[in-house]
Amino acid sequence: MDEFSFIQSIKQDTYRQPSLLKGVGDDAAVFRQSSEDVVIAVDTFVEHVHFSKETMKPFHIGHRVLAANISDIAAMGGRPAFYLVSIVIPKHSTTIERNELFAGMRSLSDRYKMDLIGGDTVSGQEMSISVTVIGYVPQKKARYRSDAREDDIVFVTGTLGDSQAGFHILNNPGKYSDAFYYIDKHRMPIPQVEFAQQLEVIDRVALNDISDGIGNEASEIAEASNVSLYLYEEKLPTSESYKQFPLELQEKWKLFGGEDFELVGTVSKDNWDLVQDTAKEIGIHVTEIGYVSHYRNNHVYLHKDNQLVPLKKDGYNHFK
Amino acid sequence: MDEFSFIQSIKQDTYRQPSLLKGVGDDAAVFRQSSEDVVIAVDTFVEHVHFSKETMKPFHIGHRVLAANISDIAAMGGRPAFYLVSIVIPKHSTTIERNELFAGMRSLSDRYKMDLIGGDTVSGQEMSISVTVIGYVPQKKARYRSDAREDDIVFVTGTLGDSQAGFHILNNPGKYSDAFYYIDKHRMPIPQVEFAQQLEVIDRVALNDISDGIGNEASEIAEASNVSLYLYEEKLPTSESYKQFPLELQEKWKLFGGEDFELVGTVSKDNWDLVQDTAKEIGIHVTEIGYVSHYRNNHVYLHKDNQLVPLKKDGYNHFK
């Protein structure tokens, strides 16, 4: 099958985004959006670096690479609208694998009524998937990392470390409590789109998604906003059965374990109630985990065992 | 160097597109464009499939992958505005190679005042480059393949087969006329952005860029428009010294040789003068090469040696 036919074959039957003028099938896709701003992000995932067929089926891989990109749109306060997919596929891969991979993307894109509007497939030695996601955000409501201010409350959605715990379970078979829950959080993460969108009523929120561990993501907010973030170790939210894992791993995963795709943010104390109400309404957890200060700018500090320790940017870094 | 710092290091110092609100440095880029439509395309290039370090330096590779994407925007009648780059780089690659690759992109992007607004770099075994290009096009002036109509004139810009001739020269060292010209057309193609944009005054033009050979691209117009395209073999434009190559290769390259990044299009006879004047003004060649008919729909036919032969879709197809 040639590349043109393949993208044709996996695209949705009908487009759902009213702003779309032309989807798959020309030199480029075309859309028109005048009332909102456009947000766009791209991410590439490589086999053996970002995922492995030992722990994920093609359906999971498809789901997760799209989830990671949608999470970037969520972290801007946007709603995802379109995606384009460029895949390098080894010659030995089967049609079933390719179809499963796209099925994983499609099932997640259905949740947000996103349209696949372009892409290509190329043969190569090593599988890699590059996804471009386009979303819309109301004017002046894009959520920048640079918007943290002195005395803000630092919060995080959901629980931390679950994805790494799931990865651990997959690689170390045995008896675990809630094994499927953790595995699901690893393979099929759901980005926090609805929550971030509902914060629209608030004037200023700094947001970042946790793809490389909260240590790293909090650092990015600190640097971009020229402030410091002070977090309380004991306030970092984890799942109930998370204590079953070795203490050292618990700490490592919740601080530096990537791919939870939760959101870390800061907001003024005045708006904290509103953030909590929003989370309640949607049915997710949001936890106050620290505060913003100008004291020792551009860093993240952890209150731990009555000590204050600098939190290093030790999130997973692919390119060393 | 981590991936964040690398994209930071190679991005332009100042952004040039007035519609850009946020470039590199957050979860996603943000732009606002209300008066024009947005066009977007993505393409991935893999070493040994699309390019080889034996015939191209990193600078050329950077130039050509961006040129290929810009060409898609040109084929929509758009003007390129932004690009995002995702690169999988083997661990053994040097900083110099990476910088050269981006220098090649930057020098071309400068021509159009394009801004690099995002991307990432990931380690892998095999080099691949995925580029997303975003452009703007005046409302109702996007140039679709489906806009060819009965009795239209079929035209093509520039000359055909030059890129393949350059590739041939690089792989078969020897004495050639205009060797540097052909090599340049292969390594450093310039997409026909200005020409396509200037056609804006014309209501209806069908356009397609020649990335996979005119046989293939003309077929796409025929199928999308539900018409047939009839081309004259002796009218297909080639460079003056093109005759130096073996006859068989001449024919193969001009019909099926990809990556010339010229434009093939159709336009009503009434507007043909306007198309010619536009080309003259810009200083490029445009040649009438055939006509559109409803006779035997959805195919391309070649008038050759007083015979009419169906032109197969034998453009290079990466995914078989």
Image: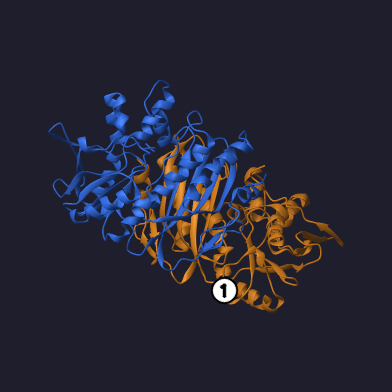
Chain colours: A blue, B orange
**Viewed as shown, does residue B273 lie left or right of A253?**
right
Vertical arrangement, residue A203 with respect to residue A174, above or below: below
The quarter of the picture where residue B251 lies is: bottom right
The quarter of the picture where residue B148 lies is: bottom right
Instruction: Identify which residue, A272 or B180, lies in the foreground.
Output: A272
Instruction: Identify which residue, B262 or A236, lies in the foreground.
Output: A236
Residue at horizontal 35 percent and vertical 37 percent from the top: A258
Q: Position of residue B7 (x, y in %)?
A: 38, 48
Dot 1 falls on a residue whose secondary structure is: helix
Residue at horizontal 70 percent and vertical 61 percent from the top: B240
Q: Is residue A278 visible?
A: yes
Task: Give the residue at mark 1.
Answer: B200
Residue at horizontal 64 percent and vertical 74 percent from the top: B275
Q: Position of residue B257 (x, y in %)?
A: 68, 52
For the C terminus of chain B, the quadrant is top right
Vertical arrangement, residue B12 with respect to residue B36, above or below: above
Vertical arrangement, residue B14 with respect to residue B288, above or below: above
The quarter of the picture where residue B3 lies is: top left
**Three-letter residue code for mark 1:** Glu
Instruction: Identify which residue, A25 or A251, lies in the foreground.
Output: A251
Q: Chain of mark 1?
A: B
